[in-house]
Amino acid sequence: MNSASLSFLALFLLSFGSIYADSKPLPRLPVPPFYTTQADIDRYLRLDTWSINLPALYVFGDSFVNAGNSLYLHIPSKANYTPYGIDFRGVPTGRPTNGRLVVDFIAQVFGLPFPPPILGLSESQKKTITTGLSFACSSAGILHMPPALVPILGNILSLDDQIQLFKDTIPMLKGQFDSTECFDSYMSKSLFFIHIGGNDLGVYWELANLQKKFPKVKKYTSLLSEQLYSRLKAMYQLGARKFLVNNVFPLGYQPVNLHLKMNGTSFIEDMNQRAASFNARLPKVLRKLEKSLKGSTFVLFDMYKLFEDVLAQPATYGFTNVKDSCCIDISGNQTRPCRPNSVPCADRASHVFFDPFHPSESIHFLWLRRLLKDNSFCSPINLLQLIKS
Ligand SMILES: *[C@@H]1O[C@H](CO)[C@@H](O)[C@H](O)[C@H]1NC(C)=O
Ligand SMILES: *[C@@H]1O[C@H](CO)[C@@H](O)[C@H](O)[C@H]1NC(C)=O
């Protein structure tokens, strides 16, 4: 470790070590094998999900939970080549990491298939799948992507587009139930998983700065939370009842940002503070939704805390590298996606990040473990409680 990275570590130990001293470290637990049964993974995680009925898992959001919708869009970076997928039977699927996503793990825990990307399904598949779908797409935001980014990041699905696609599939879904009551009951038991906001606060914000618009944090995060409010409400109006909403992780710690070296640590801290100010608004947004939308439950997962906790005590979780991409990227300086067909680092499980933007499968698995049962990361209840409720 060089002195720059040491001082960087010292910096965030100083700033965050004390705040998160309360979060209980989890015992180390390797990622379970790809081929696992519900019984095996339940035993592994000391769960008992047999009696719990989760009929479907619907996924909305950005690249962190993208299962491959990007493959069907005009997007330059599709993660459709190795080393992406190296721990996903070696098959690149568009998931921008080495293995499974947190939502794939949730599916395994509850005995569901991995939620497939909606854009990859045939019309007849759309009429038969009732176990959930993924609408998530790389570079997606709460806001529509600024047009100036389209030539760089492609024609993506914004959160609005994702909700529209969900709306379009509802008639087909409904056709598979005997009655409206059965359909409503199914929808009310299904889980709606949302991971969004990082691009709004990251690349969309940076563009606005380049265009000399210089948004104000307070005004911008207020706009984002209002927009998220109305989109979650739209999902409720389509039948969703159980929501799991993730807040935004400390963006500055992505390898791409650490290696851009734009004005050093203040650039990184600005990004993290932006994420934190947006996150500070979320509890109120979700409580307001829950209060006004009858029969709804909104659980907030603290992604920010998940990262801070790991970065403050990486060794506890078996991480030896918190700041570098595991794969060699296209530019070689950790600012671009993985280089096609390159050999990634050997110790993938001990890297927090797989590419310069996205967490490794080990983080996805830790995310699952915190989500399921940990009330110091979930509020007001944890995922198991949400699904049982
Ligand atoms: C990274 O490498 C690319 C290609 O060599 C170069 O254009 C870019 O300026 C480099 N970026 C940084 C932050 O070093
Ligand atoms: C770096 O900081 C200076 C002074 O605060 C500012 O004018 C400049 O725009 C910053 N550059 C970047 C790339 O953020």
Image (cartoon, helix red, strand yellow):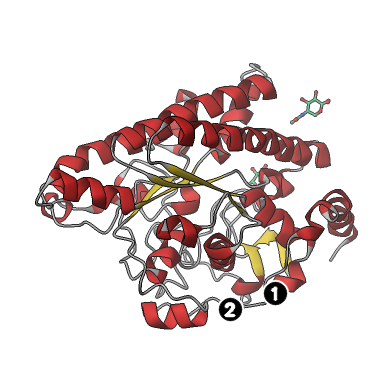
Quadrant placement of the N terminus: bottom right
| Amino acid type for the residue under numbered disc 2 | Pro
Q: Is residue 186 above or below residue 89?
A: above
Residue 140 x/y as whole percent? 45, 38
- Quadrant in the rendering for residue 38: bottom left
As drawn, the label of residue 318 is: 1
Residue 92 x/y as whole percent? 39, 64
Quarter of the rendered structure image containing ligand 2:
top right
Residue at point 16%, 52% (across, down): 122
Secondary structure beneath dot 1 equals loop
Q: Is residue 91 visible?
A: no
Q: Is residue 291 left or right of residue 92?
A: right
- Quadrant in the rendering for residue 209: top right
Residue at point 46%, 55% (across, down): 386
Q: Is residue 85 visible?
A: yes
- Quadrant in the rendering for residue 166: top left
Q: Is residue 92 left or right of residue 352?
A: left
| Amino acid type for the residue under numbered disc 1 | Gly
As drawn, the label of residue 30 is: 2
Residue 350 x/y as whole percent? 66, 72
Q: Is residue 273 left or right of residue 265?
A: left
Residue 201 x/y as whole percent? 61, 34
Residue at point 34%, 61% (across, down): 54
Q: CA distance from mark 1 to mark 2?
A: 9 Å
